[in-house]
Amino acid sequence: MNTSRFIRAVAFASCVSSTAAIVAACSADEGSDPREDFDSGKYTVGDSSLPGYDGGPPNEAGVVGPTCTGTCVVQLAVGGSFACALFSDGKISCWGSNLSGQLGVTGVDSSSTPIQLRGLVPIKTISAGGWHSCALTTDERIFCWGINSSAEVGATADTKPHFDPNEVKGFPIGAKPVDVQSGSFHSCALLTGDRVACWGYNAQGQLGTGTASGQTVSPTNSAKPSAISSLTGATSITLGGQTTCATMPSGIECLGSNIFGQLGRGSATPLVDVRSAALGSVIVGVDSFLSAQGRNFAVTRQDGRVVLWGSNGYGESGIGDAATDIYGPTLYPGLENIASATAGNDMTCVVTKERSVKCWGRNTSGQVGQPSGGTITKPTLVPNLTNVYRVALSTLSFGCALTYDGEVYCWGANESGQLGDGTTTSSSTPVKVKF
């Protein structure tokens, strides 16, 4: 999920995110390509020009992202029942469920407060999938840890938790990773040369390789990164649950599962596709921010409008609680002055330009920020959240917000301590993570 620049393509421009909300306080030189400057040390963790930075407008002082003194959070990645934060010194802390090793530590099944991951310093960017995590280091290597049932960590698939980060190897010769993003059971790297390579689960074609039959693809997984030829020319990537998308010169293109209309092609046919194709014209020609986490997608246009498509069982991609999925990019009527929209599992949240948060969709655990449970059919204000920069949503039932002050607040389900407040008590009201 996440590039730093509102990148202008021929017909479309986007900054891309899936599970991460990234913050920074620096800006790139006009017209420069930050990938050419990594080795020189010109850019640092938290720099708005880093790949992995998900953009957003500057604040009143002209600074993109939060401002804080000392060491502070510069990126937030939310997975299934866990979350991780990257700090300005390149260190990572994670909290929540650790049953699959997704916190990167041994000796605990879960933690209700953040635990620092040792050994991987410094880190440029992080991502969180359903039950695994990945990180890109400053020396341009990718490490993953957690569940590996479908080769998610870049090792031969097995059933044991991988607590220790595993280096993902086998990228095309001469290519270096500049960003990493994670879906439910797969991950992808954006490489130098504007290429994309993915590994992990492939039963819906999300690795961009294999042969489709009905709604399955074989081979079903790969521990070695597979280059996606149809995404050559990509400038950014984002991953849904079983879907892979990239910003291309022609616009956003997606491949993988299309059962809920995730590919945005106007229908659920084909059910899966290993080849990418461009989305509809409603998002062409504008600078945008793309977010995906499960089966639905959200695009925030530069004009403050929001475009949605995909799963709509709880009204998360459309109007009300209609169970009809949205098969093509659709402008949400009446929703304006939005700084960013984030798609989660069966829900959607937006950050307004006034820096408040509104959410709607499934609310069984208070993840929409309301105590009533059930389904919230319209964008509704989440209480006690102000000065918010970006929201990151889980593949399950909680969300977190990163403020311009560099603080993190979470709400929703908390059975594994994923709210990070030192308890396992669920809360529809955001609580502050205790770093």
Image: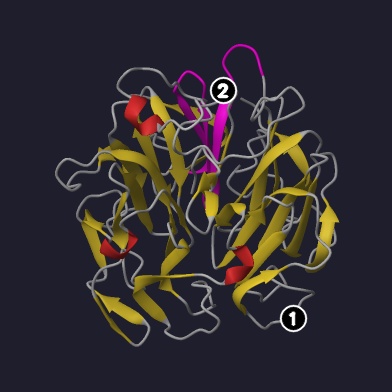
Residue 323 shows up from this direction: yes
Real-space Cα separation, disc 2 to disc 1, in angstroms: 43 Å
Q: Position of residue 40 (x, y in %)?
A: 32, 18
> Which residue does the numbered mark 2 point to in the structure image?
26
Q: Secondary structure at mark 1?
A: loop
Task: Give left or right: position of 378 versus 176.
Answer: right
> Which residue does the numbered mark 1 point to in the structure image?
322
Q: Residue at x 84, y 57 (%)?
A: 380
Residue type at mark 2 is: Cys
Q: Position of residue 346 (x, y in %)?
A: 64, 66
Q: Earlier in the sequence, mark 2 or mark 1?
A: 2
Q: Which residues are magenta?
A: 68-97
Above/below status of 325 relative to 53: below
Q: Secondary structure at mark 2?
A: loop
Residue type at mark 1 is: Ala
- Res. 410 image quadrant: top right
Q: Mark 1 Cα within 10 Å, few/some/many (few <14, many 20+)?
A: some
- Res. 178 image quadrant: top left
Q: Position of residue 125 (x, y in %)?
A: 44, 35
- Res. 203 image quadrant: bottom left
Residue 345 shows up from this direction: no
Q: Position of residue 6 (x, y in %)?
A: 55, 43
Mark 1 and mark 2 in contact (Cβ < 8 Å)? Answer: no
Q: Mark 2 Cα within 10 Å, few/some/many (few <14, many 20+)?
A: some
Q: Residue at x 68, y 34 (%)?
A: 421
Out of 318 and 119, give the one closest to the viewer.
318
In magenta stretch: residue 80? yes
Task: Give left or right: position of 429 versus 393.
Answer: right
In magenta stretch: residue 210? no
Task: Give left or right: position of 409 versus 118.
Answer: right
Q: Main secondary structure of the magenta part?
A: strand
